[in-house]
Amino acid sequence: MLQSSNGIVDLPVQGTFDPFRVWLYYTKLQLGSPPRDYYVQIDTGSDVLWVSCGSCNGCPETSGLQIELNLFDPQSSSTSQFISCSDRRCSLGIQSSDSECSTQSNQCSYTFQYGDGSGTSGYYVSDLLHLETILEGSDGKNRCSTLQTGDLTKSDRAVDGIFGFGQQGMSVISQLASQGVAPNVFSHCLRGDDGGGGILVIGEIVEPNIVYSPLVPSHVCNIKNRGTIVDSGTTLAYLAAEAYDPFISAITASVSQSVHPVVSNGNQCYLITSSVSDIFPQVSLNFAGGASMILRPQDYLIQQGSISGAARWCIGLQKLQGSGITILGDLVLKDKIIVYDLGGQRIGWANYDCSMSVNVSATSRTGKSEYVNAGQISDSSSLHLDPYNLIPASIVSFLVLIISLQGNFLFL
């Protein structure tokens, strides 16, 4: 059914980038038969879809986000099936480091740890994932979490699970594309205002000002041309250690006549009495292929209260030691259209007011390109997903780090 509607899927987005409020973006899915609602964090830095299960140890039972959490119970879904050790999908998972098989239970299980130290473990389940298409939902393999650790156990910002959009075969987007029922591209536009939310579609958002940079193979980092991970599951952003100190020095030097620099909890901050847009420079991140991402001051600064009537703004980019890579999280990604063209192995972006509607490209059966508004949703439906590669991956591009200051632009 997705194939007949050109495979364009629209997913609702809630949440914000603000680390003092929600600090994550999430969407709502329906799983199982009968379908039940599950809220999952949108994460382009991991590869799989998992939700908390009824037997979970450490899974939050309530959420400070004012959403109702549901524990997935495979026994309550008439379409749920456990993935056995003999299933070829399990054998593919064992080839990576996150899956294993128990000979006693004959269940394919997994263990996965995120960059912040939190983790999840459980077992694989195949069940229906219901998706809403724009023009007119899926037997998909997901993970059932029975143990959570770290920040995943906290209830203040708890969700039911994580929806991985990585570029390997285990992700939902890759499963759909491998069967030819949806394009191998997805896009989002995350609102940076207090209301938050935004747009997430399986399909390509079309905007004239989008520029593209090539993706690189997963887990490849080049010290000269640093690998850059684009990760919607990261709240802030992390700059390679050798570039971080020059970046701070350049920013501070450019505003030294207008602000009072202070250090707060190890972070470089500034006390100001006027608008940050009038004082701080825009920053240009220059990528391979000639594409540049322009950051406004609000894309690399976070306001942290005030002191004696002066607003305290702090650098939101953190130093990442040892790896030589840069991670662009929600602080940077907000208020932009981001297009992940996995089929074309490129990533694109453009500054955009994400409270507005967007146009999404669809290719009809005749090969003609059509454009639809991402808000025009109709029926939901179902189809089969089949993973081929279980290696977790991130969306990675090359960032060329060149520090100089020209006029009101700081180039990185």
Image: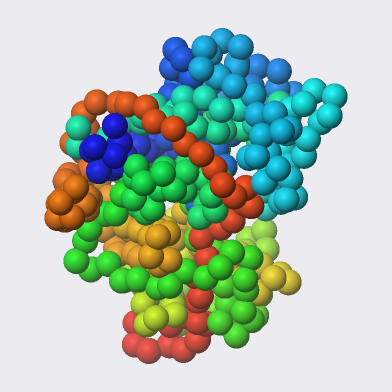
Residue shown at the point (34%, 64%) measured from the top left: 349
Q: Quadrant of residue 91?
A: top right
Total labels: the figure holds 0
Q: Which residue is depicted at the point 51% across and 17% down?
A: 79
Colour convention of the picture: rainbow
Residue 185, given in percent of the width and then of the height, sits at: 37, 54
- Along the line of sight, the residue nearer the viewer: 263 or 150: 150
The image quarter containing residue 200 is top left
x then y, percent, for residue 254: 45, 82
Question: Height in image: 223 above or below 174?
Answer: below
Q: Is residue 330 left or right of residue 327?
A: left
Counting from the top left corner in percent of width and height, residue 400 is at: 50, 82
- Left or right of 254? Residue 339 is left
Give 86 or 70, whichever is nearer the viewer: 86
Q: Residue at (44%, 77%) from the top-left corner?
A: 287
- Can you say whether 349 is above or below 283 in the image? above
Q: Can residue 168 be seen by looking at this rendering? A: yes
Q: Residue furthest right?
A: 104
Quarter placement of the N terminus: top left
Where does residue 74 sit, x and y in percent of width and height? 60, 17
Viewed as shown, does residue 170 lie left or right of 294? right
For the question of whether residue 155 can be seen, the reply is: no
- Image point (37%, 89%), residue name: 406
- Above or below: residue 364 compared with residue 273: above
Up-down: is 343 above or below 2? Answer: below
85, 281: nearer the viewer: 85
Q: For residue 108, what is the image quadrant?
A: top right
Q: Nearer the viewer, residue 191 or 34?
A: 34
